[in-house]
Amino acid sequence: MDDMLHPKSRMPEYFESHPLESPSSPTHNPYSWTYGMEGQDWIKVLGRTPENLKKFDIGISVGALSRSNLPFYRKWATVPATGIYPFDTELAPFSTTTSKEPQTHNRVLIVDVGASQGATMKEIRQAFPQLTGKIITQDLARVVENIPADYLPPELDIHPMLHDFWTPQPVRGACVYYLRRIMHDWPDDLCRKILTHTVNAMAPDSRLLIADVLIPDQVQKEDLYCYWKDLTMLTFAGRERSGADWRTLFESVGLVVVKVWRAEVGTQAVVEGRLREPGGEVE
């Protein structure tokens, strides 16, 4: 986060020499400009020192925890793992212990794309032990290869996998594809690329869950956090999105928004999507 404060403070200076419009290029924006690395995306700029990447990976892993044993923190955590989407009831039809469909037993229950060390899936598994089935967490080699050996005990049935979300999704036909705090890092055109890889792997009944901040239709004073987040994302051409933004983005890749699950407090949400069925909306 410290790395973002400098670009935010220099925005007035940046816009004196650049078009006065929201940055839309992941390689030409206040963040890359501030650090003299225009032409590189924010990951490469952040990775200009190994220490920066190490701090980032630790922060993402810690930030995944919603402290589900403490109700106050669960409500206010940044996109908490539990407490928004009812995994227990919604995914019961896919669980190997409750599903009546034989083919379910051979399917991956959840694929967590860009999962860091797997803290989110670990918390979900521990919160809903009745949801059985294989979970796969995907991230880059620098993350997966540094997961402590005892961090994901075998009984959790959570399996790390090397995967870059700019490449085709290798796990096909999973029950759920889950992306948490991924999409807000990128402009719409690159989000479409990430989503297209996911869509191409989805089965007709697969679900896509996007866990992110949701810009409200009407501004309330308690919603100011999401605008601070949006301003932070703007420094490297990312953005927070409204419900209308998500619907437009989903429709552009053949998905339909089924429901937006909102947190009790704050602007955190889970946007649920499914493949658009020929001739109509998904029920």
Image (cartoon, helix red, strand yellow):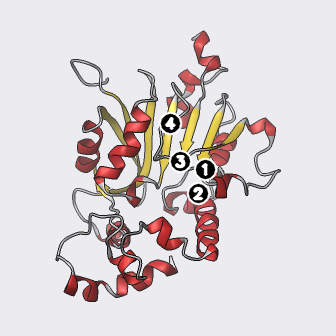
In terms of sequence position, does the residue under pointer 4 or pointer 2 come before the other?
A: 2
Q: Mark 2 points at which residue?
A: 64
Q: Name the residue under label 4.
A: 169
Q: Which residue is drawn at 25% across and 39% down?
A: 252
Q: Residue at x 25, y 37 (%)?
A: 251
Q: Mark 1 points at which residue?
A: 120
Q: Residue at x 59, y 77 (%)?
A: 49
Task: Report the label total.
Answer: 4
Residue 268 visible, this angle: no
Task: Say which mark, if any, is on residue 160.
Answer: none
Rounded to the nearest whole Å, what is the CA distance between mark 3 and mark 2?
19 Å
Against 82, residue 203 (above or below) is above
Name the one closer to the observer, 71 or 127. Answer: 127
Mark 1–mark 2 CB contact (< 8 Å): yes
Rounded to the nearest whole Å, what is the CA distance between mark 1 and mark 3?
18 Å
In terms of sequence position, does the residue under pointer 1 or pointer 2 come before the other?
A: 2
* 63 left or right, relative to 24: right
Rounded to the nearest whole Å, what is the CA distance between mark 4 and mark 1?
20 Å
Callout 2 secondary element: loop
Where's residue 40, x and y in %? 41, 68
Name the one closer to the observer, 169 or 124. Answer: 169
Residue 76 visible, this angle: yes
* 69 left or right, relative to 63: right
Q: Name the residue under label 3.
A: 164
Q: Which residue lies furthest to the left in this view?
A: 20
In terms of sequence position, does the residue under pointer 1 or pointer 3 come before the other?
A: 1
